[in-house]
Image (cartoon, coloured by chain):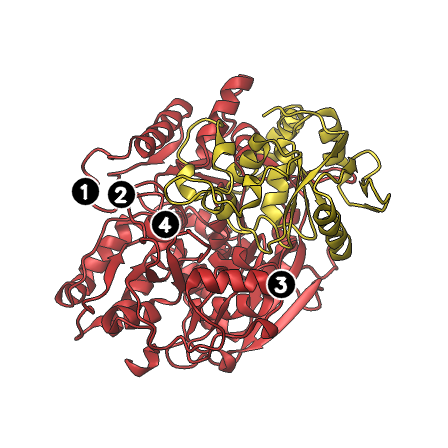
Amino acid sequence: MSNQANTLFDKVWDAHVVRKIADGPDVFFIDRHFIHEVTSPVAFLGLESRNIGVMYSERTFATADHNTPTINQHLPVADPLSANQLKALETNSLKYGISHWGLGHARNGIVHVVGPENGITLPGMTIVCGDSHTSTHGAFGAIAFGIGTSEVEMVLSSQCIMQPKPKKMRVNVVGELGKGVTPKDVTLYIISKLTTAGATGYFVEYAGEVFEKMSMEGRMTVCNMSIEMGARGGMIAPDETTFAYINGRDQAPKGEKWDNALAYWKTLKTDEGAVFDKEYTFDAADIEPMITYGTNPGMGQGISRNIPTSEQVEGGKSTYDKSLAYMGFHENESMLGKKIDYVFIGSCTNGRIEDFRAFASIVKGRKKADNVTAWVVPGSHIVEAQIKEEGILDILTEAGFELRQPGCSACLAMNDDKIPAGKYAVSTSNRNFEGRQGPGARTLLASPLVAAAAAVTGVVTDPRDLL
Amino acid sequence: MAYDKFTLLRSTAVPLPIENVDTDQIIPARFLKATKREGFGDNLFRDWRYNGDETPKADFVLNNPIYKGKILVGGHNFGSGSSREHAAWAIYDYGFRCVVSSFFADIFKGNSLNIGILPVQVSPEFLDKIFLAIEADPNAEFEVNLEEQKITIVSSGESETFDINGYKKHNMINGFDDIDYLQAMKGEIKEFEAERIY
């Protein structure tokens, strides 16, 4: 084993296999388990019906995010079903001794934002959560992925899941990104090339200059979207950028523990000559600001291009036509200049401080378009505080925007933040599925820069024209 | 969660020849607010199944009484998107025990196996044959034999084998689940945990 060239993924995976089952999955140990109010209650009921407890409560972290309102969080939650789920999370956390960051807690926020910003997410870890965007944490060189509620119950009761080892893919992006091209554009570009099923069965490592130069926030955006091309997760080798981000965070190792951890983290990279099951290389120069036109995240393109015809895309024509009919778009149309109704910046994909800095860079000195309703939603209270401290709130307020309170918000519209039927929203979130942001809502996925350009012009606009 | 054992299923099937059916369509997010696993079948494909005023959409397959059965046949990349197990619960609760497609999203496939739905992945060619068989006769029967890992179009006798890992197959045939397995190896897990650096 020792002289064999291994990938980053192999190194972390193999270190967590408790038992290998012949012709079966690995019994896979989980270092950190995040839970939220939506996918955990039935798992706790399962524990009760089997009369078993939580094996390592200190390895589990609960935060409320999917159902939480983004205004008046000091008031009782109006929707009784949402309130009931939030209460169940609190009650279960208390009962089993699990740390719980509920509504009103200073560190509350979206699970995939608060994990990293508090130093809970570290390189070389295995991290799961009943949420597909758990892949976000792979930005730190962790193996992180979403699980179902049966698996939430497994982790609570045994700290393990039964998981076959995925195949390995490497996606390289080389060269320099152009003006106005952000990490969100990089990931939307990769997904548009690989399709929403292109990485199913694989775990992806992102490599190359573009990711080496990318900030931690940007890496989280890219790893977050890995699930949208079917991958179980994505990861990036930890480096000086990673270590600098973690150092000093609340729950990060300190002193001697830090030194030991750092020595280990430096071994977490793909060895020269390690073999991947599949490998792709893209040129950064080919990527422009992206926007989606259809009803899955793979239906995206450079913002200056026309919507492709059904002959130009893979898959069935009837499915493609259904998608465009839902969106109210036609083949071969330009996306530029299309009137929009809503803008949403936030979510676990683009709800971090860097995203609001980018948004504000275009908003500064301009006004919100009258026809646009904008929801500006930080990913956590810590991000909210940064927005205020850095003067971003002043820029937003001057331009006519209001800052809301943290949560998943319109990303999946489980709270009141729903895009009305038939309306167009430019969203920095991760999914444009039919009805994702409310029944009948039409979502155009894009970067914070594209969202800002749309928010101030009222139409789909190339952000490079405003920079 | 215990589920019914799965050995042999002979049934008519419901065709849904749409690609990339995501879990937001199978069960929209607004129906995920329950704290118990009950009643999800009522909201299966909610927005494809009902108009805004709660009347059924006549052209959606679940509202067409000529199609019924315990097998749902979907297009390529079935179950993409969210990890919500509620999608699999909704399919199970509605009465399906098997989903057939030419390609499944990862987490959906795992969730299905964990709750007792058998995902059967067939070749695109065989999937087309299944759709054609249902089109020719909505009462066409299909036989899914888990022991032999084989799906057969009963009228023509054409069949194809499918993959499933041995451990999961054993569990489904016997109605066991992973938690039983993991509870039995807690000692080994404790030893492993004690060596963790985090």
**Disc 3 or disc 2, which is closer to the eye?**
3
Q: Are marks 1 and 4 on the same chain?
A: yes
Label 4 crowding class (10 Å Cα cut-off): few <14, some 14-19, many 20+?
many
Where residue A255 sits: x, y (%)? 40, 49
Give the residue drawn at x 62%, y 54%. Answer: B77
- Asked if the residue under mark 4 is in contact with the one under mark 1, i.e. CB atoms within 8 Å, the reply is no
Label 1 crowding class (10 Å Cα cut-off): few <14, some 14-19, many 20+?
few
Q: Earlier in the sequence, mark 3 or mark 1?
A: 1
Of the pair A302 and A381, the residue shown nearer to us: A302
| Residue B167 shown left or right of residue A37 in the figure | right
Where residue B90 sits: x, y (%)? 53, 35
Q: Earlier in the sequence, mark 4 or mark 3?
A: 3
Mark 1 and mark 2: span between their CA atoms?
Answer: 7 Å
**Disc 1 or disc 4, which is closer to the eye?**
4
Mark 3 and mark 2: span between their CA atoms?
Answer: 39 Å
Q: Earlier in the sequence, mark 2 or mark 4?
A: 2
Quadrant of the rendered image containing residue A315: bottom right
Where residue A411 sits: x, y (%)? 37, 52
Q: What chain is colored red? A: A
**Disc 4 or disc 3, which is closer to the eye?**
3
- Chain hosting mark 1: A
On the image, numbered disc 4 is attached to which residue? Answer: A438
Q: Is residue A68 visible?
A: yes
SS for dot 1: loop
On the image, numbered disc 2 is attached to which residue? Answer: A69
| Residue B194 shown left or right of residue A307 in the figure | right
- Chain hosting mark 3: A
Mark 3 and mark 1: span between their CA atoms?
Answer: 46 Å
Q: What chain is colored yellow? A: B
From the viewer's perspective, is residue A431 above or below residue A371? above
On the image, numbered disc 3 is attached to which residue? Answer: A316
- Asked if the residue under mark 4 is in contact with the one under mark 2, i.e. CB atoms within 8 Å, the reply is no
